[in-house]
Amino acid sequence: MTSERARAVLAALEAMADPARLDGMRRYGIATDRAIGVGVTDLRRFARSIGRDHRLAGELWRSGVHEARMLATIVDEPALVTPAQMDAWVRAFDSWDLCDGACGNLFDRTPYWFDKAVEWSAHEPEFERRAGFALMAWSAVHRTDQPDRRFERFFPLIRRRATDDRNYVKKAVSWALRQIGKRGPELNAQAIRTARRIATIDDPAARWIARDALRELESPKVQERVRGRAARVGAS
């Protein structure tokens, strides 16, 4: 049974919806079969007025409405999320934005981020595998409390899936490699070595991933950034 609060939130989403947005969402490759046309900026603003609510998040997810599910990833409470919930949600992903939103808004803040990144990277369905690498990428950005050595363990998984030529997987593999390589000089050097090893694989997807990653990892902007980070750490 849907609670009164969940019904009110769903009604508010309907009132915010603009079906004219759906064409733009489709152009960006977002599945719109169950979408109503609410922008992410509006969802984040709405989420701030709601606050964290684990029960509400579950009800919003069960509604099946695309934007309600995205809102659920923002308002859920990471400390209350279980591995079973994460697995159930990842199996329901039908669009890259929901996949990336769940990983970057919620899953990377749970205690299970590392194990699920490893596990999902081996799953066969496209968005489940993408979730594994999206979780690596977002965790590299958000989990500043974690030591770099944990992220080193992702490099073999990145190499292993570098020949997956599905668009949403190969882009996420590159994304994970680039974000890990921007954490600091040691990981940057390891990420560059990993990309160069991937470049030697006789496979179009692998060559694309290597080029995409090296373009950013070796850029002056990133090199300056990781040197500056090393200097700040050394001075602290």
Image (tube, helix red, strand yellow):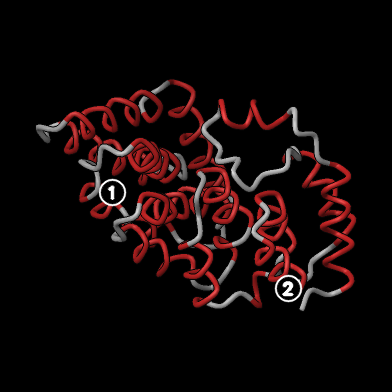
Q: Please report whichever mark, 2 or 1, sits nearer to the chain's N-terminal start.
A: 2
In the depicted view, which residue is nearer to us: 233 or 176? 176
| Above or below 185: residue 220 | above
Labels 2 & 1 near each other (Cβ < 8 A): no
Seen at 58% across and 56% down, the residue is 102
Q: Position of residue 179 (x, y in %)?
A: 45, 42
| Above or below 127: residue 204 | above
Residue 35: name its quadrant. top right
| Above or below 79: residue 7 | above
Residue 217: name its quadrant. top left
Label 2: which residue? 54
Is residue 185 among the parts visible in the rendering? no
Q: Is residue 200 left or right of residue 50?
A: left
Q: Is residue 90 left or right of residue 64?
A: left
Label 1: which residue? 158
Please rate how many residues cluster around mark 2, counting C-alpha atoms within 10 Å: few if below 14, some from 14 to 19, many from 20: some
Q: Is residue 53 left or right of residue 203?
A: right
Tag on residue 142? none
Please rate how many residues cluster around mark 1, counting C-alpha atoms within 10 Å: few if below 14, some from 14 to 19, many from 20: many
* Disc 1, SS: helix
Q: Position of residue 165 (x, y in %)?
A: 26, 37
Is residue 149 among the parts visible in the rendering? yes
In the depicted view, which residue is nearer to us: 136 or 101? 101
Q: Position of residue 135 (x, y in %)?
A: 47, 55
Residue occupying the far top of the picture: 220
Residue type for callout 1:
Ile
Seen at 72% across and 30% down, the residue is 21
* Disc 2, SS: helix
Q: Position of residue 106 (x, y in %)?
A: 62, 61
